[in-house]
Image (cartoon, rainbow, N blue to C red):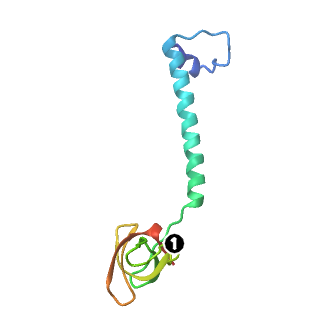
């Protein structure tokens, strides 16, 4: 195409050139792809600043998020209860999930790393 030939010859700076419809689309497509890659790398850098990579060892004592809900029958108000409860890592499942147990050894459940703090 005309566009690819002019690009190889470095003659694209001339504004008096007229391109066909397809060549114009090719130019816009290349610019859009380039900008999308730039923005993707920028966003990736910003995101990675605020994410954390954690790994807990089996047997390590951690704090798990308390998902207990308020109950009128029992008189429990979750707003005034603890947000995190102490637990121990029983087993690691995959890269982000952990099977937890309470301090007496009773299984509590499977929790994501975002719901576990040290």
Give the farthest residue toward the bottom.
104
Residue 105 % position (x, y): 33, 88
Q: In the image, is residue 32 above or below residue 55?
A: above
What residue sits 54% from the left and 16% below the top?
A: 24
Residue 74 % position (x, y): 39, 78
What residue sits 60% from the left and 59% below the top?
A: 49
Side of 11 where 108 appears, left or right: left
Q: In the image, is residue 6 above or below residue 34?
A: above
Residue nearer the viewer, 59 or 102: 102
What residue sits 56% from the left and 11% below the top?
A: 19
Q: Mark 1 points at which residue?
A: 79
Side of 83 where 108 appears, left or right: left
Query: Residue 66, located in which quarter of the rendered image?
Result: bottom left
What residue sits 44% from the left and 77% below the top?
A: 76
Give the farthest residue toward the left.
107
Q: In the image, is residue 105 above or below residue 13?
A: below
Q: What element carries label 1?
A: loop
Query: Residue 37, located in which quarter of the rendered image?
Result: top right
Side of 53 where 99 appears, left or right: left
Residue nearer the viewer, 76 or 53: 76
Residue 10 % position (x, y): 63, 21
Q: Residues within 10 Å of mark 1 (few under 14, many from 20)?
A: few
């Amino acid at each position: 195409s005309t566009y690819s030939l002019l690009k190889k010859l470095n003659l694209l700076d001339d504004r008096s050139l007229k391109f066909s419809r397809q060549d114009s689309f090719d130019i816009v497509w290349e610019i859009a792809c380039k900008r999308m890659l730039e923005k993707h790398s920028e966003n990736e850098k910003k995101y990675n600043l605020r994410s954390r990579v954690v790994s807990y060892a089996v047997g390590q004592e951690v704090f798990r998020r308390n998902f207990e809900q308020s109950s009128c029958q029992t008189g429990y108000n979750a707003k005034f209860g603890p947000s995190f409860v102490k637990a121990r890592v029983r087993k690691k499942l995959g890269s982000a999930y952990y099977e937890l147990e309470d301090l007496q050894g009773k299984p509590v459940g499977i929790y994501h790393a975002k719901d576990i703090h040290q």
